[in-house]
Image (tube, grey):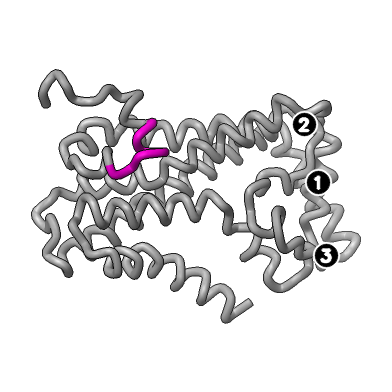
Amino acid sequence: MNSSAPSIGTAFINGLVAPSALFGEIKLLRRYGLYALMAVLLLSLFSNYTFFSNMSEQHLLSEQLAQVQGLSASEMEMAAEMMQKTLPYTGLIAGAISAASLLLQILLLSVYVMMVAKLTAANSQLRFSDYVNFSSWCYLPACASALGLTLLVFTSSTPDLPLSLQYYASFNQLFIHYSSDAPLHNLAQSFALFDLWIIALLITGFITSFKLSFGQAIVAGLLPYALIYGTWFAIA
């Protein structure tokens, strides 16, 4: 890498707003890939920890119990007792689960991207770590999502926030407004504007890094989401 190579800060900015400049250089993806992965995981952990840890235990317990449906009075009481024991650790647990979930998603996407590359004979000789680096950059919008949640927490007039605020950018929160007992509530709650950003980065990466045609990149970028959410919609 020569001295004119972009700095890590420039790489992050390009990853968010000018992805073609980043995805056009495999060596650059490899050089800063670990930083992208750590940023995604650590910011997710921090934002979830901050979100839950600032709440009063009574409010948090009430919010958690409100998420539980279909239990008898005795079952609800048992659930409350179990939740009470873990309340002091909810922030850490939620942060760890969020980071672990993102890591799993990135690894699964890496496998998918590797399969696409091998099937299309596009940079098929890359190492698996290169696909992880590529996928980590595609998930950079998760950093923006985490920072947005942290900003909402810090600017709120009260620390006792509704749990639904975690999904502040979801299609359900912004547009659809399904009630929690609606069959498609969880699906609409899980898909957010940041997912569209991830898809856009993935498509851009397929075009720039793997030299797929525009049509191939659209299909390859949308396919995993179409399969996951299409199946979810069919069984909901």
Q: Main secondary structure of the magenta part?
A: helix
The residue where tag 3 is placed is 71
The residue where tag 2 is placed is 55
Instruction: Judge the density around disc 1: few (<14), some (14-19), many (≥20) Cα neighbours within 10 Å.
Output: some
Name the residue type under label 3: Leu
Can residue 48 be seen by looking at this rendering? yes
Q: Is mark 3 on a helix, strand or loop?
A: loop
The residue where tag 1 is placed is 63
Left or right: where does residue 42 sit relative to residue 183?
A: left
- The structure residue drawn at horizontal position 34% and vertical position 70%, both measured from the top left corner, is 219
Mark 3 or mark 1, which is nearer to you?
Answer: 1
Q: Tell me where residue 236 appears, x and y as whole percent.
A: 63, 77
Placement of 222 over or under 163, stated as above or below: below
User: Between disc 2 and disc 1, whose residue precedes?
Assistant: 2
User: Between disc 2 and disc 3, whose residue precedes?
Assistant: 2
- The structure residue drawn at horizontal position 63% and vertical position 53%, both measured from the top left corner, is 170
Left or right: where does residue 160 sit relative to residue 51?
A: right
- The structure residue drawn at horizontal position 17% and vertical position 69%, both measured from the top left corner, is 119
Task: Please report the bounds of the magenta region as a residue range.
Answer: 13-20
- The structure residue drawn at horizontal position 73% and vertical position 38%, both measured from the top left corner, is 85
